[in-house]
Amino acid sequence: MKRINIMLLCLGLAGGAAFAQQIHFNYDRSANFSAYKTYQWVDRKELQVGDPLLDQDLKNIVDTQFARKGLRRVESGADLHISYQGAISQEKEYDMLRSGPGPGWWGDGRVTSSTVEVGKLLIELFDAATGQLVWRGSAEKVLDIKKDPDKNYRDLEKAVAKLLKNYPPGGRKN
């Protein structure tokens, strides 16, 4: 019984850790990021904007972050092209409820599962002159899409700020 409880606890911890906010980025190490002064939004051909309000909110948040970094948005002739992709998926989350005497690894327990919504955002920056990808960042976080829209907006602001903290790479960070 003790071995089963330990395994269930580990499963519960692993499941909980999998849903913490995750930020990843990568970049072209040969790109001269100090040369990029302007950017423009480009829509990927394969994407359909599902929610025009969310699209507008996300672009406004990114625009604010880039302005703080000294980048200026233009409608044409930019140094960088920026696009994004977003998705919401459903995943299982496992929690262990422990009961019984004693702290630590012993006692009776059971594992419960629930379905959670996980939001994923991918932002990509391309050198406008060459068309080459120069920076990519992604953020992933458990969402409650039934929350107050203002709370969701603040959560999106925090996620984008944390993500774009990694731009430009290796140089000036705001």
Image: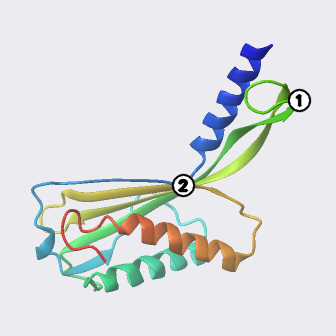
Identified at 78% across, 33% down, the residue is 103
The residue that appears at 60% across and 76% down in the rendered structure is 154
Tell me the kind of residue under disc 2.
Gln
Residue 73 in which image quadrant: bottom left
Distance from the alpha carbon under mark 1 to that under mark 2: 34 Å
Which one is nearer the viewer's eye here, 4 or 158? 4
Q: Which mark is residue 101?
A: 1
- Is the N terminus in the top left, top right, bottom left or bottom right quadrant? top right
- Label 1: state its secondary structure: loop
Residue type indicated by callout 1: Pro
> Which residue occupies the foreground of this view, 4 or 58?
4
x then y, percent, for residue 129: 12, 68
User: Left or right: where does residue 16 sit relative to residue 78?
Assistant: right
The C terminus: image quadrant: bottom left
Q: Dot 2, crowdedness within 10 Å: few (<14), some or many (≥20)? A: some
In this image, 27 relative to 89: left or right? left
Between tags 1 and 2, which lies in front? 1
Upstream in sequence: badge 1 or badge 2: 2
Q: Name the element at disc 2.
A: loop
Q: Which residue is mark 2?
A: 21
Instruction: State left or right for residue 47 relative to residue 153.
Output: left
Residue 43 is at least partly visible in this image: no
User: Can you give x and y, in whole percent of width and height, for residue 61 in the image?
Assistant: 47, 79
Residue 43 is labelled as none
